[in-house]
Image: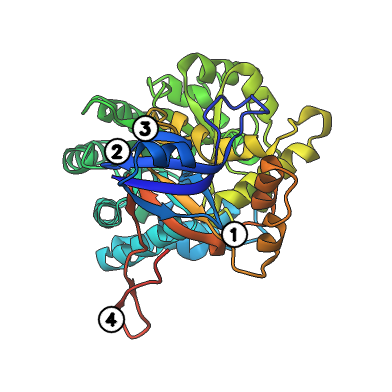
Amino acid sequence: MTLYRATVLDTPGDLPTADGLRASEDCGLVVHDGIITFRGDFAGVRAAFPDEEVVDLRGGVLLPGFVDTHVHYPQVRVVGGLGMPLLDWLRECALPEELSLADPVYAHGVARDFLSGLVHAGTTTALVFGSHFADAVDALFTEAETVGLRITAGLVVSDRLLAPGLHTTPAAALRDGEELVARWHGRGRLRYAVSPRFALSASEAMLESCAALMDAAPGLWFTSHLNENVDEIEHVNRLFPGAADYLGTYDAHGLVNARSVLAHNVHPSAAELGVLAGAGAAVAHCPSSNSALGSGLFPLRDHLDAGVRVALGTDVGAGTGFSLLKEGLQAYFVQQLLGPDGLTLTPAHLLHLATRSGALALGLGDRVGDLGVGREFDAVRLHPRPGSTLDVALRHPKDATDALAKIFTLGTPADIDVVWVAGQVVTAPAQLSRDGSLSPMETT
């Protein structure tokens, strides 16, 4: 058992609650076998547990581990491809790099780079868009198991309109998916997500294959893209003339349910929002990517008014980095730019979107996402460097809400000091040095 002493900020309530910040300036958290078993004022907790080891984390802020609900593992090395809309960016940046993951050795290196990015950004749980190659998906799961993060991912499948090297057949997609599910789904902190790239590159037969795979084991997840870009939507409408809308391409095959997370949905119809809400599906809002690709401004108010669950995704590599602090700030900017159609986001909203919203979207709300009793101790200690602007700002907050606003405004991965998953400190994986030998990365 370990007793942690820290300033703790978390948001255990529901997203629309503007005043949902739980702030404990001098908090005691008792963690036993990775589970928070007691929480309260430190003096009282210490009196109740006088003999336990104390880990003093004062001087920083303890937050729940961040939850990323949409991020592409093969794209970590192509972040920064600016100046293009979605379909051009895919053709020029993302897809050529994704072809490289046919080489298993290259794929393992990319997986290590990817997981290192998550760890250094304080992300402890992620729904990951995998690779088009089964060996590369194996590489991701293998490396993730070593690091210890909570990863849900799967084989990305397509059978049209991409580079031929990224295509597969519905039969092969089902066979490869079943083999990956048997190896990885439910193994430790790993789960499998059925992942057609998007309806644009998946025929009716491929979506039928995805539906068949969903029945291969209990508890599988589904993820894909939805209504990201107006040109993409027009292409999908032409390819699926019998579908009511973009979401209907998935829903017709039974792929929209409470274990579905659809990325983007920048341009939804009211009917689509109704279907998402009725199914209990969630949307991953990726504000940096939407801005970088010029996809549009996300209608958060419409989603929440319709009862659709929303969380944050970084969408690396169209997104601009792994930091969910930055995504929270960008989400705030997007809503401000929408004016009266936007939703004014408080710092508590931003923290919820980056933590508990993601846990709820991924069916993990009873295990992670806040630092309450009964939750696993997935946590991030934010401790800015002395003399940095964030360090100065955090020494002069008006209150906890103001401190959290400063964290989202100024915080970066450089301010992440320690990351825990289920009570264990996690570190970045070893990386290949320039001469090809393995060298350990700096730990968090």
Camera-near label (2 vs 1) is 1
Q: Distance between the residues labelled 2 and 1?
A: 30 Å
Residue 386 on image: x %, y %:
62, 69
Camera-near label (2 vs 3) is 3
Q: Mark 4 points at which residue?
A: 437
Q: Which amino acid does label 4 sit on?
A: Ser
Q: What residue type is labelled 2?
A: Tyr
Q: Which mark is residue 412?
A: 1
Q: Which amino acid does label 3 sit on?
A: Arg
Q: Distance between the residues labelled 3 and 4?
A: 38 Å
Q: Mark 2 points at which residue?
A: 192
- Report helix, strand or loop for mark 1: loop
Residue 108 to residue 375: above or below: below
Side of 103 where 444 appears, left or right: right
Camera-near label (3 vs 4) is 3
Mark 2 or 3, nearer chain start = 2
The answer to whether residue 293 of the structure is visible from this angle is: no
Q: Distance between the residues labelled 2 and 4?
A: 32 Å
Q: Distance between the residues labelled 2 and 3?
A: 18 Å
Q: Name the residue under label 3.
A: 367
Q: How far apart are marks 3 and 1 (CA)?
A: 26 Å
Residue 409 to residue 219: above or below: below
Mark 3 or 4, nearer chain start = 3
- Report helix, strand or loop for mark 4: loop
- Closer to the camera in the image, 387 or 220: 387
Camera-near label (4 vs 1) is 1
State which quarter of the image contains the N terminus.
top left
Asked if disc 2 and disc 1 are in contact, CB closer than 8 Å, the reply is no
